[in-house]
């Protein structure tokens, strides 16, 4: 029911920065970023609620910042100090408040960090 469109992926050198955006077709309360590297399972990266509360995976704490623009139904992921290990397809996701799992997903955007 909710459509999500990611953008902002690309190629960046290690130590560099990149900002991802995800636009939702409807108002959302909780939005999150996941990523999946080749041969790896999809993993949680960060989440944000409309009240500003955030949650981060240990692997990105201190380097990534998630934020939400409630007026635009858009979530951002500012990625700093990028490492080769951050290379993956990044997916935006959202869910209803009472849902256990994230149920709406974007198409993904590729982030490649060169050594």
Image (spheres, rainbow, N blue to C red):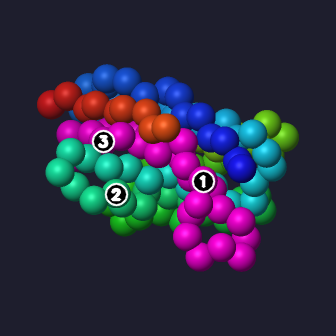
Q: Is residue 73 magenta?
A: no
Mark 3 or 2, closer to the camera: 2
Tell whether label 2 touches label 3 (CB within 8 Å).
no
Q: Is residue 78 visible?
A: no
Is residue 83 a member of the stretch shown in magenta? Answer: yes
In this rendered view, identify the residue nearer to me: 108 or 60.
108
Where is residue 90? Give x, y as percent: 42, 43
Q: Identify the magenta region.
A: 78-106
Judge from the rendering whether residue 103 lies leftward or rightward of residue 74; answer left or right. left
Residue that badge 3 annotates: 88
Circle 3: element type = strand
Q: Earlier in the sequence, mark 3 or mark 2?
A: 2
Mark 1–mark 2 distance (CA, rounded to whole Å):
15 Å
Q: Which residue is mark 1?
A: 104
Tell me how far mark 3 sits from mark 2, CA to CA.
9 Å
Observer able to see residue 103: yes
Q: Nearer the viewer, mark 1 or mark 3?
A: 1
Q: How many marks?
A: 3
Q: Which residue is mark 2?
A: 42
Q: In terms of image quadrants, where is residue 88?
A: top left
């Amino acid at each position: 029911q909710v459509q999500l469109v990611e953008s902002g992926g690309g190629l960046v050198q290690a130590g560099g920065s990149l900002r991802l955006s995800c636009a939702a077709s409807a108002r959302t309360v909780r939005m999150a970023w996941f990523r999946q590297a080749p041969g790896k399972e999809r993993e949680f990266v960060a989440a944000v609620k409309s009240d500003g509360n955030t949650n981060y995976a240990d692997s990105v704490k201190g380097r990534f910042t998630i934020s939400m623009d409630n007026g635009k139904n858009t979530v951002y992921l500012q990625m700093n100090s990028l490492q080769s290990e951050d290379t993956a397809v990044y997916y935006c996701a959202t869910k209803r408040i009472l849902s256990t799992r994230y149920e709406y997903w974007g198409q993904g955007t590729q982030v490649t960090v060169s050594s």
